[in-house]
Amino acid sequence: MSPTTGTARTARTARTTWPRKAIALLAALAIVLFTAYSAGAYWNADNDESLEYAKTRDSVLNAGERHIARLNSMDADDVEAGLAQWLDATGGALHEELERGNDASAEVLAEVGTTTVATVTDAALLQLDTRAGTARMIASVRVETTPSSGEATTDRKRFEAGLGRTDDGWKLTSLTAITTAADES
């Protein structure tokens, strides 16, 4: 082996080792930058006010859907439990109104003997004010009615509802039927 052959090998090894080291260094740098970016993005998402607002919006919409379905449902075999659910779903003036008429409603509902089961098929929030603790929503509801005698029917109804934040969560404070041109003809 001549002295020039060993030097040529060393030079060739240096030429092939340098790019490998540079690629490894760039890969390590890319991993560090990606990890730093990911950690920053995670921290921002975890502390993002718009994310908190979105969670509240979803929670209010979910509560509104449940409560609208409750107020349009009644089991003829257990009217007292149904009225208790109505009161549990409401707050403010609507709650007070239902509470005042509770005894009369119990008599009429027990006498009629009709069972209704409501399902919210679509709903949307129209307004949400988290500071004031108020919201407005609309909902489309399918109501299956089974009378004590006769044939069962299914109706579709639309409602606008007001909601208010209470110590027990979001409750309905108003519920108004919405008529459409098809309803009026």
Image: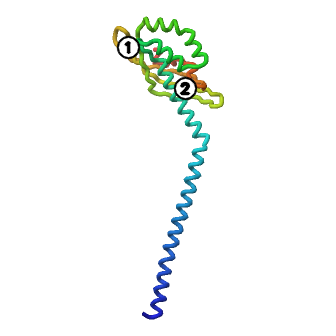
As helix, strand or loop, the secondary structure at mark 2 comes to strand
Query: In the image, what residue occupies the spot 45% across and 25% down?
Result: 120
Which residue is tagged 1? Answer: 146
Q: Nearer the viewer, mark 1 or mark 2?
A: 1
Mark 1 and mark 2 in contact? Answer it, CB < 8 Å. no
Percent coordinates x, y for residue 6 in the rendering? 46, 89
Kind of residue at badge 1? Thr
Q: Left or right? Give the position of 54 relative to 153.
A: right
Query: In which quadrant will I find the N terminus?
Result: bottom left
Query: In the image, what residue occupies the spot 43% across and 23% down?
Result: 119
* Disc 1 to disc 2, C-alpha distance: 28 Å
As helix, strand or loop, the secondary structure at mark 1 comes to strand
* Image mark for residue 137: 2
Query: Which sits earlier in the primary sequence, circle 1 or circle 2?
Result: 2
Mark 1 crowd level (few <14, some 14–19, many ≥20, 10 Å Cα):
some
Query: In the image, what residue occupies the spot 35% across and 8% down?
Result: 149
Percent coordinates x, y for residue 107 in the rendering? 47, 5
Percent coordinates x, y for residue 79 in the rendering? 45, 12
As drawn, 60 above or below 70: below
* Image mark for residue 73: none
Count the numbered circles shown: 2
Mark 2 crowd level (few <14, some 14–19, many ≥20, 10 Å Cα):
many
Query: In the image, what residue occupies the spot 51% across and 6% down?
Result: 104
Q: Residue furthest bottom?
A: 2
Kind of residue at badge 2? Met
Query: In which quadrant will I find the C terminus?
Result: top left
Query: Foreground residue, 123 or 62?
Result: 62
Report the coloring of the rendering: rainbow
